[in-house]
Image (spheres, rainbow, N blue to C red):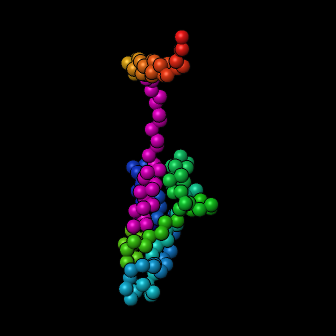
Amino acid sequence: MADLISITGRIAIDPSEIEENFVRASGPGGQNVNKVATAVQLRFDLMGSPSLPEPVKTRAAVLAGSRLGKDGVITIQAVRFRTQKDNREDALQRLVALLKEAAIPPTPRRPTRPTLASKRRRLERKSLRSGVKSLRGRVDTD
């Protein structure tokens, strides 16, 4: 059995949950560009993964965006490098980074109240502005 891929101290995924397909990449590659399949398509079944808790799955689904298909599978394309090995590592690192970010629970917002001084400043500015606008009224002709 291969080693687990660590996401956080408590969360790890089994490499058997990841499916890799190798395809030909466009772009630089010299004479090998039309012969060697160096690009990697990494597929990870997010919604079907037993390794991830539900809150992490929902946050990862939002973070994945267009990389998440309707079937709940995250697809990552890696074509940055010329070698299959480097592209494979790049795709795996990007998946782990996405899952690490999803594993961090959002900090709850704590509502704050304006200070007494800021309330006073606001009211003073309002009264000054009110005074300026009151001077723009009609001119009395006696």
Does residue 72 appear in this view?
yes
Q: In this view, does 72 lie to the left or right of 32?
A: right
Q: For residue 4: magenta?
A: no
Q: Which of 35 and 1 is in front in this view?
A: 35
The one nearer the camera, 103 or 80, is: 80
Relative to 121, residue 35 above or below: below
Left or right: 67, with 94 as reference point: right
Kindly identify the residue that appears in the image at 62 percent across and 60 percent down. 70
**Which residue in the rendered view is the most extreme toward the top?**
142
Location of residue 13 with respect to 142 vertically, above or below: below
| Residue placed furthest toward the front | 142
Task: Name the residue rendered at 45%, 56% in the picture.
Answer: 98
Q: Where is residue 39 in the image (x, y as percent from the top left)?
A: 45, 75
Q: Is residue 93 found inside the magenta-colored segment of the image?
A: yes
* Residue 6 locus on image (x, y percent): 40, 56
Q: Quadrant of the C terminus?
A: top right
Residues in magenta? 90-114
- Provide residue 130's location: percent of width, then percent of height: 48, 20
Most foreground residue, 106 or 28: 28
